[in-house]
Image: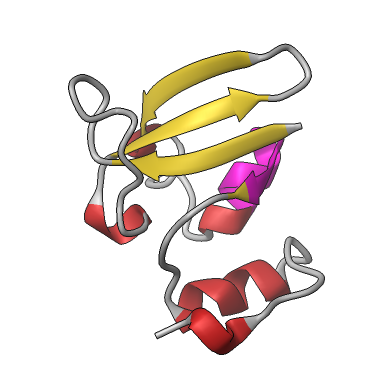
Amino acid sequence: MNIIIPVTDNKDAKDIIAQGFHNTYYACVYNSTDNIYEWMDTNEFIQMEGNISLALKRRGILTIITSHIHLMALGLFNESGSCTLCDTSCIS
């Protein structure tokens, strides 16, 4: 399973979770099957497609860990079938 986590940067603060993809240009992709971490520039996959959820699915990323997600972004994930059960009580 591939998991993506938005992080502050890809150097000194790469272990600090960012406030969401809208506040950073970097992410950590963790492959839990092979126990491999990869830090990448989010522009590598986000700008190539208008829908971030579809871009992530194409890269095999089906799980996101983030401290914040906008309601509109959550709607995109839900519409594309990437989100099957969502608790919106913590969304601002």
Q: Position of residue 67 (x, y in %)?
A: 42, 61
Name the residue: 60% across, 44% down. 56
Q: Is residue 2 above or below residue 49?
A: above
Asked whether, in this view, residue 35 is left or right of residue 15, the answer is: right
Asked whether, in this view, residue 41 is left or right of residue 79, the answer is: left
Name the residue: 23% across, 32% down. 9
Q: Does 60 lie within the magenta span? A: yes
Name the quadrant of the N terminus: top right
Q: Does 25 lie within the magenta span? A: no
Name the quadrant of the C terminus: bottom left
Name the residue: 47% across, 82% down. 91
Q: Is residue 63 above or below residue 10?
A: below
Q: Position of residue 47 (x, y in %)?
A: 37, 46
Asked whether, in this view, residue 60 is left or right of residue 13, the answer is: right
Disc tally is 0
Q: Nearer the viewer, residue 73 or 4?
A: 4
Asked whether, in this view, residue 79 is left or right of residue 18, the answer is: right
Q: Check the image and name the residue furthest to the left.
A: 12
Name the residue: 59% across, 26% down. 30
Q: Position of residue 11 (x, y in %)?
A: 21, 19
Q: Position of residue 80 (x, y in %)?
A: 72, 66
Here the colouring is secondary structure
Give, as a single range, the part of the protein colored magenta: 54-63
